[in-house]
Amino acid sequence: MNCYEKLREKLDLFPVGMPKSTEAAELLQLLFGDDDILVASNVPNPPLMFSAKKIARKSGVGKEEAAARLQSLAARGLIMEYKVLGEPLYTLLPAVPGFIEMQFMPAGPVDEKKRRAGELWRIMMGGELGKENHGYPTSGIRVIPIKKSVDTTQKVFNFEETEKIIRASGTIAIADCACRKAVGKCSAPLDVCMMFNVMADYLIEKNMARKATLKEAVKALERAEDAGLVHTTANSKPPIQIICNCCSCCCMSLWGVTNLGKAAGSVSSNFSALVQDESVCIKCGMCAKVCPMGAITVTEDLTAVNTGKCIGCGLCAHKCPTGAMVLSRKSESEPPTTTLHLAAKMSGERNKLPRMINNLTKEIF
């Protein structure tokens, strides 16, 4: 087995892995390169973290060479680097959400190599990677509704309010939207994706995001809403690490509904759009125009919502000039308690737990 395939197999152990394909092979070669792949293929999967010395021994190279290559890989956003008692320790990142997105998050133009990486990413999402991401009961992604679009009689939980999530966070960072930067199909704002707490600290340190104030973060949310972007996050309870603001033409979080023909349930949401008062609806068509899922149709006599496509983002109600459209709660389901619970649930559905345990045993011993 060559080192690229060894790395791909390890990456495929993540809840959303890296299924084998010619595009996956090209992507790994493009980003990791022949000089670093030997060392990269011996970086362990989480929760394990190894020192440069241990990875050097597994790779059969000198410690200084391994340390330099590991630092380079971490600086390029391809693996994670943690400092434990002052010593750097390393572990793998998943492909998505993970090291692919990190190639596009820093501010600035995209070079030809990364442009090709974006093309490969999109092709992969149209194949087995997309099916793995969106083809199982538990979604890794949850839509957070625009607060003012929710019917005022409805209860709203803390994990369903973007501003409360932001205000409860420590460090805040803002980065460019990796999907829009990679795909480039629209002119929606780039600098509206937010990271919090430990993830924010890490990305700021690695120059992949900039530190932001609470006021800047709230303004970014408003810019995203006004641009017709959908608030999404990991499908777990706070504290959360990221809020993305997604468009329907570029963003992979919405790919299952927009490109793979999946029902709205492939993205977790507790809300659905509803014409609350047909008598005040002026049939202007604004709700249909801004709906990222194409879930609304407007005729002279009726405004109808296809609940099989509606993801409950609230953009329709946000843009409705008369207040006829609102979000109505369709369930009170709570997300998994932590991202670890979410990962375990997703891995179990994909029957990956036995392979993960086997790999961890090999890494340790």
Image (cartoon, rainbow, N blue to C red):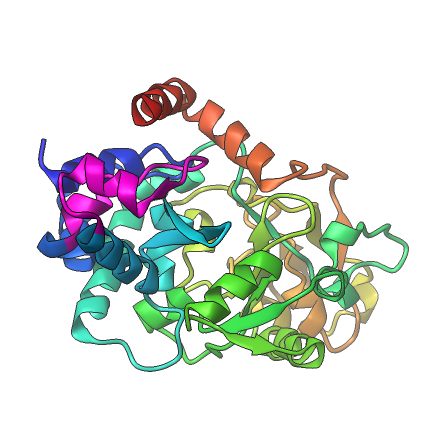
Residue 27 in sight here: no
Residue 233 seen from this side: yes
Q: Residue at x 54, y 45 (%)?
A: 264
Q: Which residues are magenta?
A: 36-63
Query: Is 275 above or below relative to 176?
Result: above
35 lies left or right of 279: left
Name the quadrant of the N terminus.
top left
Foreground: 32 or 311?
32
- What residue occupies the far right of the structure in this picture? 153
Q: Tell me if residue 64 is in the magenta stretch.
A: no
**Position above or below: 59 against 291:** above
Depth order, front residue of 172/35: 35
Residue 363, horizontal then vertical, whole percent: 31, 27
Whether 157 is drawn above or below 297: the answer is above
Figure quadrant of the C terminus = top left
Q: Position of residue 107 (x, y in %)?
A: 40, 79
Residue 316 as seen in the image, left or right of residue 309 = right
Name the residue nearer the viewer: 155 or 275.
155
The foreground one among 129 and 314 is 129
Residue drawn 45% across and 28% down? 347
Q: Quadrant of residue 250?
A: bottom left
Residue at point 30%, 81% (across, down): 109
Q: Is residue 42 magenta?
A: yes
Instruction: Say whether residue 93 is left or right of residue 35.
Output: right
Q: Residue 188 location, x and y as percent?
A: 47, 78
- The residue located at (49%, 77%) in the rendering is 191
Can you give x and y, in whole percent of width and height, for residue 290 in the image? 56, 70
